[in-house]
Every structure is written in C-alpha cells, then in structure tokens.
C-alpha cells in the first residue's frame, strides 16, 4: 500500500497489485462509520481517494490510520444483490458475438451466467464499473465513440460491464438495454448501483 | 420573486454543493470561488450554505418583484440599481420593480450576488447547486426565469457598510501547489518547467476546469494510468502535455496523471482566472507530517 499526498485535503491510497478487491475492501472498512474528519471516499480501479477536513484530522495522522486499516476480505463483502432484467438487442451484440466467436446467444449466456460487483463509479451519477466479466468478453472500446448512447444501455469494455444511467456519449460495446431506473435523485440513496453492490443480469425477451 | 431579464454569458445558482457523494458519481460542485460566495452570504446575514447567484463575465440583469437585501462580491463590476450606482462588497436594499444590472468585471471572472434568505430554488440531493458536468441541479439561468427568494435561516444583519476585501488580481497570478499524487509520471525537466514557467489561461476554461497553454510537460513513463479519484485544484496533464486545473464541477475520477494540486486557500484565485491571464505555480512541500 502506497499513500500519496493529493493536495492539502486528500490522500490517495494506491493498493497496487491488490487490485479492485483490495480497494473495495479498504473502502468497506472505512465506510461505515467513516473515521472522524474523513469527508469523502472515492474508490477507483487501483486507488482509494480519501478526502479529509484538516481542522479535524491531520494528514500524517490520517496516513497512519489508513496504513493500519485492515481491508475487509473479498469473501466477507456481501453487498446487496440486485437483479437487472435485460433485453439483449444491443447495437454491438452481433459484432461482439463475431469477435469472441461465441455468437450472440453465447454472449448472452456468458453475460448472464456471472455474478458482478460494483467496483467504483465516477463516469456519471449512478454509473457503476462492474467487475466479474468473463475474460472471453474482454473487448476494447469502440474505435469511434458514439455521440449518443441511450439511457439503460448495457455495455462492455475491457474487464468491465456497466449500464448507462442516462443518455450520454460513450465508447463501450452495447449488448442490451434495461428499463430499471439506475438513478433517481429523490431516492435515498439515489444510485441503485453503489460500490460493493452485487449484480446479476437476467435475459428478458 | 426575482425575474431574470438577461442572464449574461453564464449565471448559475450555487451553494456549498454536494460533498460526500463521489462514490456514487456525484461531484461536490458548489460556488467556484467559495470565499466570495461565503462573504456574500455573511454580508446579508445568511448562513454559509445559502444559495447565491454566480455570474461569469457579468451581463446579468434582474428585476425584483419584492423588497430584498442584497450584496455583490467577487469579480468587481459596475453595479446599477435602477438609476443609482451601488458598490461591491457593500449590502444594499432593492425595492419592488427595480432592476439590478451587473456589468462586465474589470478584473477576475466570477461575480456573486447574495439575497437575504437565499435563492429558494428546489434542492437536488440536498443542494441547490448547478453541476454543469453531471447535469444536476437547476439549469443555468435563462431570460424570463423567475427565482424565488428563499426563507433560509438568517442571522442578524451585520453592521458592516463595506467589507474591505482585495479585488481579484488583474495581472499575473501565482498559486501554491502541492506536488503529487502522480508527479513521478513526469521527467525532472518537466517538473522544473512546471515550477518555473508561466502559463496562460485559455478561453476553453469553464466551471469544470481552467485550461492552460504554455510549455509542454513531458512524461517520464508511457502507458495509461487507470482512472482514479480527483479533487478540486487537481492539475491534470493529458497527452497534449498542457495542464488543466480542475474547479468545482470537476469529474469525480479521471485517467490522466495529476502533477500537483492547488492549495485549497488558493482555489478562489484559480476560480477568478480569466482567459489571457497568466498563472505560475509555486511548489510547497508534500511531505506527510508525522502524526501529532
């Protein structure tokens, strides 16, 4: 674990080879309750950003606290399980089927077979990067991003799958769509998918 | 109620934003120059969390339908109430039917207008801030909008006729920067350049960030950095080698290395940087102090 300064009110913890499991484990250990003075936790692929209020905790003291925090082991993180109904009719499904040699039906079978975990967000309110995608489905992003991806689009890119919470530009390969509302500012919490949430996709025709 | 006669180039409602929600993809947002916004609230007796108007490059014309105690802070601009001139940083009363006109600022970029009771638009996730990047909160003001004056908790009116604050600098800016967290992605030469060169603010700047032009910062290592959390003041260096300083509506995570972070106390200076103005960075120690 490597702790770096990120300005006067944040530290960046780099878990290195520990990867997403280590980030989520550290995020879980610090989330509930947050240590005094910690104002925000931002998990990402290899790092956890910890923002703090210097009036309550000093950078040195916080660094020591972080270094002494035991990450929650992956097998003990049992976040809420959410089932997402998906119409597998995405614009890139045929292409993904061809590229992987699985065919469209094989892609759907493989995408619905796994259990995923929300590792982190950050692209837009309510968007989650889901880990657990079968390595056979690891594909690069589209060479030319689409200027308009519809809300609810279920997509894959690299080692991740995800769902666009609202229409936006995007370069991921679109395999399907869901009607489930992912983001509702009036709901508490507003995001359906939060770091640690477990996901299963179910095919609907 | 306050009617928007003309919104100017960009006027938004801002408060202290939405802290603590970054894990859900929601940035803090809020006033870009938090110091000027806080001063505005204090001068009309509001609490710090009240919503104010943040106007970029002036040009805002409002018509008041009710009596209101107001104040204008931040980038200094000509202020006209009906046929009278009013001063910056000095609270005054606007009467029903009167027009309030904010002209173009003479230095700085963002001017703040607070009304006693706050701007009373609906809250989204506990905040009235417009987040232009995430698309949260009220839309930027348009001609014909009508804004309610809020009924937020107020304290007594301070017995201050004018607050003695310096105007934002109209010439070269210097801000203090703590190196890291990814300064090790750059060559020693690039770090020297970063600490000594003068950069110029481009017109591509907005509430998301201040884009700069000047000497290119070369990387010591190739490859892509995996996405990681960002903070306001983070100076991100994309493949162009030209730094970009994140402001209030910065993305929650980003994939380009951050060479340094502007100190919180100097962020209001960055938020007032206008296109064409120069910025230089002064490095301060990033060593972690021992725990007390």
Image: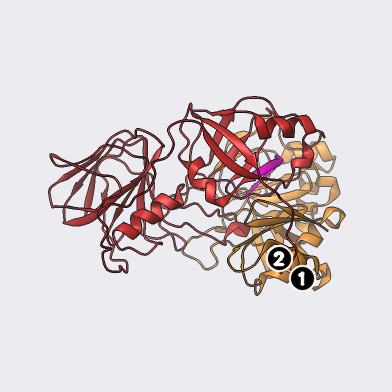
- In-image side of A76 versus B53 (left or right): right
In the rendered image, residue A171, in percent from the top left (x then y), is placed at: 66, 37
In the rendered image, residue B215, in percent from the top left (x then y), is placed at: 66, 24
Q: What label does residue A77 carry, if any? A: 1
Q: How is the image coloured?
A: by chain
Q: Residue at x 50, y 34 (%)?
A: B205
Disc 2 designates what residue? A62
Looking at marks 1 and 2 on the same chain, the residue that comes earlier in the sequence is marked by: 2
> Magenta part of the protein: which range?
B250-260
Residue B255 drawn in magenta: yes
Chain that is coloured red in the picture:
B
Splitting the image into 4 quarters, where does residue B209 fall?
top right
What secondary structure is found at the residue carrying circle 2? helix
In the rendered image, residue B223, in percent from the top left (x then y), is placed at: 81, 36
Q: Residue at x 37, y 48 (%)?
A: B165
Q: Residues within 10 Å of mark 1 (few under 14, many from 20)?
A: some
């Amino acid at each position: 674990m490597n702790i770096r300064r990120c300005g006067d009110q944040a530290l960046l913890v780099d878990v290195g080879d520990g990867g997403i499991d280590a980030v989520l484990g550290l995020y879980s250990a610090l989330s509930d309750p947050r240590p005094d003075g910690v104002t925000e936790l931002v998990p990402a692929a290899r790092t956890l950003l910890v923002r703090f209020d210097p009036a309550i905790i000093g950078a040195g003291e916080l660094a020591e606290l972080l270094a002494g925090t035991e990450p929650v082991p992956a097998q003990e993180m049992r976040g809420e399980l959410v089932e997402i109904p998906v119409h597998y009719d995405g614009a890139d499904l045929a292409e993904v089927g061809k590229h992987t040699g699985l065919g469209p039906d094989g892609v759907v079978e493989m995408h619905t077979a796994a259990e995923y975990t929300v590792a982190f967000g950050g692209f837009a309110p309510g968007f989650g990067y889901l880990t657990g995608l079968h390595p056979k489905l690891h594909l690069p992003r589209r060479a030319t991003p689409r200027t308009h991806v519809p809300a609810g689009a279920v997509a894959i890119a690299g080692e991740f799958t995800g769902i666009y919470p609202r229409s936006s530009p995007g370069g991921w390969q679109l395999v399907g769509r869901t009607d489930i509302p992912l983001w509702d500012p009036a709901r508490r919490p507003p995001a359906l998918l939060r770091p640690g949430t477990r996901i299963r996709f179910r095919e609907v025709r | 109620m306050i009617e928007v006669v003309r919104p100017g180039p960009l006027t938004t409602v801002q408060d202290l934003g939405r802290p603590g929600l970054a894990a859900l993809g929601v940035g803090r947002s809020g006033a870009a120059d938090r110091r000027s916004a806080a001063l505005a609230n204090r001068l009309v007796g509001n609490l710090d969390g009240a919503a104010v108007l943040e106007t970029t490059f002036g040009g805002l014309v409002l018509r008041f339908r009710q009596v209101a105690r107001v104040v204008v802070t931040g980038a200094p601009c000509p202020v006209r109430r009906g046929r009278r001139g009013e001063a910056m940083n000095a609270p005054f009363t606007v009467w029903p039917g009167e027009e309030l006109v904010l002209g173009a600022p003479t230095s700085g970029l963002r001017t703040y207008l607070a009304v006693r009771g706050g701007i009373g638009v609906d809250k989204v996730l506990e905040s009235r801030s417009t987040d232009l990047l995430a698309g949260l909160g009220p839309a930027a003001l348009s001609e014909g909008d009508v804004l309610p004056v809020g009924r937020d908790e107020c304290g007594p009116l301070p017995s201050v006729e004018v607050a003695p604050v310096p105007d934002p600098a109209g010439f070269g800016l210097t801000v203090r920067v703590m190196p890291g967290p990814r300064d090790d992605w750059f060559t020693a030469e690039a770090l020297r350049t970063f600490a000594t060169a003068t950069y110029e603010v481009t017109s591509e700047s907005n509430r998301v960030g201040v884009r700069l032009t000047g000497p290119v910062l070369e990387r010591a290592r190739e490859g892509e950095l995996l996405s990681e959390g960002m903070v306001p003041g983070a100076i991100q260096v994309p493949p162009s080698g030209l730094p970009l300083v994140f402001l209030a509506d910065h993305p929650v995570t980003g994939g380009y290395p951050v060479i340094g972070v502007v100190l919180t106390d100097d962020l209001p200076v960055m938020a007032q940087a206008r296109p064409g103005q120069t910025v230089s960075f002064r490095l301060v120690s990033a060593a972690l102090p021992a725990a007390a």
